[in-house]
Amino acid sequence: MKLSTTFATAASLLATASAHGGVDTYKVGSTTYQGASGQKTLQRQYSTYDPLVIKDLSTVNIRCNNAGALGTGVSGTLAAGDKLTAHWKHFDGSGKVWFKIDQEGLVSGTENAGVWAGDTILDTLLWTSTIPASLAPGNYLIRHELIAVHQANNPQFYPECSQWVVTGSGTSSPSDSYLVSFPGAYKGTEPGIAFNIDSDAAKAATSYPIPGPDVWTGAGGSAPIESAAPTAVPTTLVTSAAPAKPTSSAAPAVPTTPSCSPVQKYGQCGGATYAGCTACVSGTTCTKNGDYYSQCT
């Protein structure tokens, strides 16, 4: 599963598919906050681990992966400049108020066979972003999103939100040009969403166009937004999905053509709509994970 993690205040990318998952803890300094386990937590509740797809881009679910359910009254505390680490596990902020503070995508190599930010998440189950030190204190929703692009023209979106009280002496907030709304930020036609990882272009491209607005680093901006809970602040969602048990497994398939290059570990090697190479590199096996996705593990 190629994953692009985006923070509605941040974004990053994954290059392999492992399983559906969500954030179960957040960590700031030495303090750990409970995520989506139980509902007396700072995590905005979501009802399913299933991803969102293109048809969901115009629904309220794209905001925090729920139907607009409000929070529980529990908020975490962090200072502008702090690092927030979200830990991923299986299992209303309307309006143009969201901004991106971090993103990562293709790290090296080509889109089709390179190393993505998601590989780091698969190894550690963690992703850490820094809250801009100049950010004005206040109540924020922090949205972290992963975009899985391992299926051609059928990306999967994994957004999550948590409530935070940002402290510090910052005085800045992003100008209007950095702000987006959810739904509304994605149209479904962006190059990074209408994307075919198995295309000839992806086999040659060495950069990936991450969807969404530009990253706001804390420089410039405007006076603080007059809103009780600006949605889209540092969305340091960590995309660390614990691998789900495959429904069945299959031995490595024989390459469809003699010129087929074996798929790297964690790459896609099969599925109902898949047309790429079905052979895995030595030491890995093509494992079925549903009718539409098989992966080299």
Image (cartoon, helix red, strand yellow):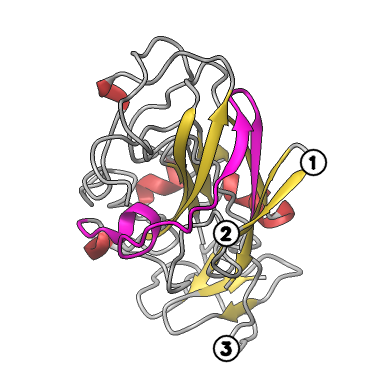
Residue situated in front as seen by the camera: 82 or 21: 82
Q: Secondary structure at mark 2?
A: loop
Residue 116 showing in the rendered view? no
Discs 1/2, front: 2
Q: Residue furthest bottom?
A: 248
Query: Is residue 5 rendered magenta in the image?
Result: no
Q: Residue at x 50, y 24 (%)?
A: 137
Residue matched to label 2: 41
Q: Amino acid at mark 1?
A: Ser
Q: Residue furthest right?
A: 30
Q: Amino acid at mark 3?
A: Thr
- Give percent across and percent down for residue 34: 65, 58
Discs 1/3, front: 1
Q: Report the span colored magenta.
A: 58-87
How would you rate the neighbour count of disc 3 (Cα within 10 Å): few for under 14, some for 14-19, many for 20 or more? few
| Image-quadrant location for residue 123 | bottom right
Residue situated in front as seen by the camera: 103 or 204: 103
- Give percent across and percent down for residue 162: 50, 50
- Give percent across and percent down for residue 83: 66, 32
Q: Secondary structure at mark 1?
A: loop
Discs 3/2, front: 2
| Image-quadrant location for residue 172 | top left
Label of residue 247 in the image: 3
Residue matched to label 1: 30
